[in-house]
Amino acid sequence: MSTNNDNAAAAVIAFVSGAVIGVAAALLLAPTTGSEMREKLSGFGENAAERMKRLAREAKFKVTPRSKGGDYGYDGGDAWI
């Protein structure tokens, strides 16, 4: 069983590595000036950083408990208002 999981993980890693190498080659071989390429890369980096911050905030929100105080739910007992 673990051999299948190892093979699948290796395939995913190989695919992602190939994609990254392909993107890097396309960027280096594209017919653009250096300043244009730097602008594109800085924009990509800023977008990725903003996205990671947003995802971190969302994950933190999902992990934190909803109420920090006592449990104020209705327990089914009789109460006079």
Image (cartoon, rainbow, N blue to C red):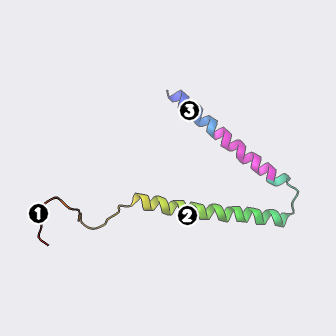
**Mark 2 / mark 1, whichever is N-terminal:** 2
Q: Secondary structure at mark 1?
A: loop
> Nearer the viewer's eye, disc 1 or disc 3?
1
Residue type at mark 2: give it: Lys
Task: Tell me where residue 58 appears, x and y as whole percent.
Answer: 49, 61
Q: Disc 3 designates what residue?
A: 6
Q: Quadrant of the C terminus?
A: bottom left
Crowd around label 3: few <14 · some 14–19 · many ≥20 (10 Å): few
Are the residues at dot 3 and dot 2 in contact (C-beta closer than 8 Å)?
no
The answer to which of 44 and 73 lies nearer the viewer is 73
Task: Tell me where residue 11 appears, x and y as whole percent.
Answer: 63, 35
Say whether residue 17 is magenta: yes
Q: Please give the name of the residue rendered at 85% of the width and 52% of the height, measured from the top-left corner.
A: 29
Q: Which residues are magenta?
A: 13-26
Residue type at mark 1: give it: Asp
Q: Disc 1 designates what residue?
A: 78
Q: Please give the name of the residue rendered at 27% of the width and 68% of the height, measured from the top-left corner.
A: 69
Rendering quarter of residue 74: bottom left
